[in-house]
Each structure stands twice: as C-alpha cells, then as structure tokens.
C-alpha cells in the first residue's frame, strides 16, 4: 500500500541484547535492520523507532515490560517478535502519526488476571497514522487488542487517514478491539477469532470496513456497527453461530491486489 513498506532493507544489521542498546540502535532515518535474539527487559517506557527501520526477532527474541512507538516516522517493519506484558499506559506497539508500517508474524500477549486496564493496547494506531498492515500475528490473552483512533473528538485530524489492513491473524482469548476503528477505512480478511470475551470487530464514528472470509468461534458480538455509527460490508464470513450487527457502507473493494483464501482454511493457516 502507498508504494510499499521496505523497512531497513539495504542497511546494516545490528544485533542488540539490552534496552539501552536497543534504544540507540533504532534511532535515525538511515536504513537499518535491528535483530533481537533474546527477550529484552524493558524499562517501562516506549522506545521511539526512526524511519526506514526493520526490527526482527530471532530465536524467540522480543521485548517485555515496555513497547515500541513509531511517532511521525515512516517505513517501519516489526517482524518475528515476542512482545508481552507492558503495563498501562504503555502499548506494546503504538503507531502515532506513522505511515507505511508493517506489523508481521509477531506474538502479542499479557494475561487476563489483572483487569482490563492493567495493560494497555497490544497494537494501537492513532493520530492520523496511515497505510498500516497487521498480518500473520498471534494475539492472545489480552483485553485491549488494537485500537485505531484515539478519541471520539479527533475527527478533524483523523478523517481521511487510517487506511488499515488486518489479514491472516490469529486472535485468541481476547477482550475487544479486534480491531476497533474510528473514522478510517479498514480491510479485515482471513483472520481467525477464537474465544472473544466482549466484542470483536468494531466500526465506529463513520469508519468504513470491508470484512471478508473471517472465521469466528465462541465470539461474543463478532461485529459491531450500529451502536456508534460505523459501517461495514461483510462478505463470506463464518460467524460461528453468533449474530453480527450489519450497517452496510460504501467500502466494497480494496484498492490493491490480494489473495483471499476460503474460510475452510482460515483456522489452520
């Protein structure tokens, strides 16, 4: 989307093993590939990531007790990371006025023992961010999954932005916001939802969503649109016996090519 996202391709590879080195390595706009091969203990704060950066996990590498933030930066990839247990108000990933960000093949989790406000978002997108893809991730055991749009009164900044795509993710044992979208345009396809406690997809405040070939199992309120003025066009979904809220909108075709799989293979992808 929007010319593609290449991250740090062509730049040097830097391996880090502690939070101080990680903070330093991700700064700046020159292309760079940051490799994490262990679990780094964060310091309870967000780590700001510069443009043209790939952060790659290997051998189970990732971050706990902190999170990453893409703030007014572009062309960033997060891949193969294990990200977990960052206490509120720090998200595991926050994209804030960021563009062309790809969140791919990561694992996000916390626990559901401490109440919904103990941790914050797993992957939140706010303040007019645009052209974001969230693909092939495993989100589990978390209340606030992925909020797109930080406030009901932020339309002046956000309208015309928030082009987001979620595909081939596994959402399991979660609370809500899977995703929750204000104002923007969302394409949600070939995701598997299992054991969703509060609500699944939530289209709000004029958001337009195309929802294709997703599978839901034991999901309370798999799709919400009517309560908060959002729109959605669902096509070919397996709701698992639940009843979605239908408020058809104008987003009926994605503006890019993609491979849409049948629902029969979604749960095993």
Image: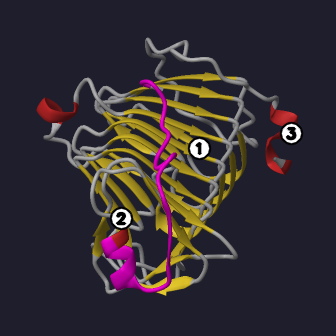
Please tell me in which quadrant of the rendered image residue 168 appears: top right
Q: Give the structural element (helix, strand or loop) at label 2.
A: loop
Residue matched to label 1: 222
Residue matched to label 3: 265
Extent of the magenta region: 2-24
Q: Distance between the residues labelled 3 and 1?
A: 19 Å
- Tell me what residue is drawn at x 59 percent, y 43 percent: 222
Nearer the camera: disc 2 or disc 3: 2
Residue 200: image location, x then y, percent: 54, 48
Residue 156: image location, x then y, percent: 12, 30
**Nearer the observer, 56 or 259:** 56
In the image, residue 86 above or below residue 53: below
**Nearer the observer, 206 or 260:** 260
Q: Distance between the residues labelled 2 and 1?
A: 37 Å
> Which numbered disc, 3 or 1, marks the residue that appears first in the sequence?
1
Residue matched to label 2: 26
**Nearer the observer, 194 or 7:** 7
**Nearer the observer, 230 or 29:** 29
Q: Number of labelled discs?
A: 3
Q: Give the structural element (helix, strand or loop) at label 3.
A: helix
> Which numbered disc, 2 or 1, marks the residue that appears first in the sequence?
2
């Amino acid at each position: 989307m929007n010319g593609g996202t290449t991250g740090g391709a062509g730049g040097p590879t830097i391996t880090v093993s502690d939070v101080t080195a990680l903070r330093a390595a991700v700064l700046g706009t020159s292309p760079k590939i940051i490799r994490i091969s262990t679990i780094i203990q964060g310091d309870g704060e967000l780590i700001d990531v510069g443009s043209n950066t790939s952060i790659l996990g290997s051998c189970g590498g990732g971050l706990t007790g902190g999170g990453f933030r893409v703030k007014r930066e572009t062309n960033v990839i997060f891949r193969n990371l294990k990200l977990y247990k960052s206490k509120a108000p720090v998200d595991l990933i926050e994209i804030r006025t960021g563009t062309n960000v790809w969140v791919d093949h990561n694992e996000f989790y916390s626990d559901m023992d401490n109440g919904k406000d103990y941790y914050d978002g797993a992957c939140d997108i706010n303040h007019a961010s645009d052209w974001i893809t969230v693909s092939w991730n495993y989100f589990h055991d978390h209340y606030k999954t992925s909020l797109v749009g930080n406030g009901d009164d932020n339309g002046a900044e956000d309208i015309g932005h928030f082009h987001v795509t979620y595909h081939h993710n596994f959402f399991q044992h979660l609370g809500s916001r899977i995703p929750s979208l204000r104002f923007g345009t969302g394409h949600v396809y070939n995701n598997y939802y299992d054991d969703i406690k509060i609500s699944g997809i939530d289209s709000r405040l004029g958001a337009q969503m195309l929802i294709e070939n997703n599978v839901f199992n034991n999901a309370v309120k798999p799709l919400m649109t009517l309560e908060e003025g959002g729109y959605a066009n669902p096509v070919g979904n397996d709701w698992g016996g639940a009843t979605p809220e239908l408020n058809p909108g104008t987003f009926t075709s994605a503006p890019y090519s993609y491979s849409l799989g049948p629902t029969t293979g979604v749960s095993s992808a």
